[in-house]
Image: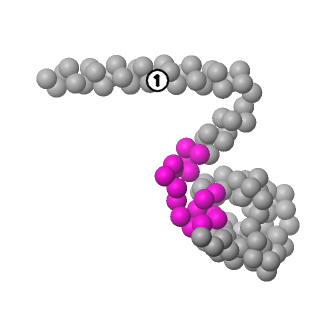
Amino acid sequence: MSVSGEDFVNRVDSKLKELNLKRQVLADYCKFSIQTFTDWKRRDSIPSADIALKIANYLNVSVEWLITGEEGEIPHEILNLAYEISALPEVYKNFIKADLAKYKSACVSLDEEKISNSS
C-alpha cells in the first residue's frame, strides 16, 4: 500500500472543511507551522506518529484513516480512548479497570434478567 503525503494532507483538509476549521487552528493545537502542510505535500511525506496521533485525536478520526484512507477494525473512538487511558498513572488505570469490572457484572445481570423475563 502506497502512503502519500498529498493524500494525507487532503484527508486532513477534507476533515477540517467538514468541521469548518482552518489549518492554522490545527497547526496551533499541534504546535507546528502552517507551512508544515505544504512541506508534507511537497516532500510526499507524512508526520511522525506522535503528530499524526495528535491530528487524529483533534479531528476525531483514526490515524489509520489519515494515513491510508481506510478504517481499521477497531473504531477510532475506542483507539483514542485506549490512548488516553494509557497515558494515565497506573493507580488511575486500576480504578478504571475496577469500574469496568463492575459495569460488566451489572450488564451480565441485566442480560440474565432480560432472558428470564422473556421466557
Residue 17 appearing in the image: no
The N terminus: image quadrant: bottom right
x, y percent for residue 54: 72, 53
Please tell me which residue lies in front, 1 or 69. Answer: 1
Is label 1 in a helix, a strand or a loop? helix
Q: Which portion, as a residue range, is magenta? A: 63-79
> Measured along the vertical axis of the image, is residue 16 above or below residue 60?
below
The image quarter containing residue 40 is bottom right
Horizontal relation, residue 60 to residue 87: left or right? left
Q: Amino acid at mark 1?
A: Tyr
x, y percent for residue 9: 69, 72
Horizontal relation, residue 117 to residue 2: left or right? left
Residue at x 69% of width, y 35% of height: 86
The C terminus: image quadrant: top left
> Measured along the vertical axis of the image, is residue 115 above or below residue 26?
above
Residue 98 shown in magenta: no
Q: Which residue is mark 1?
A: 103
> Measured along the vertical axis of the image, is residue 83 above or below residue 47?
above
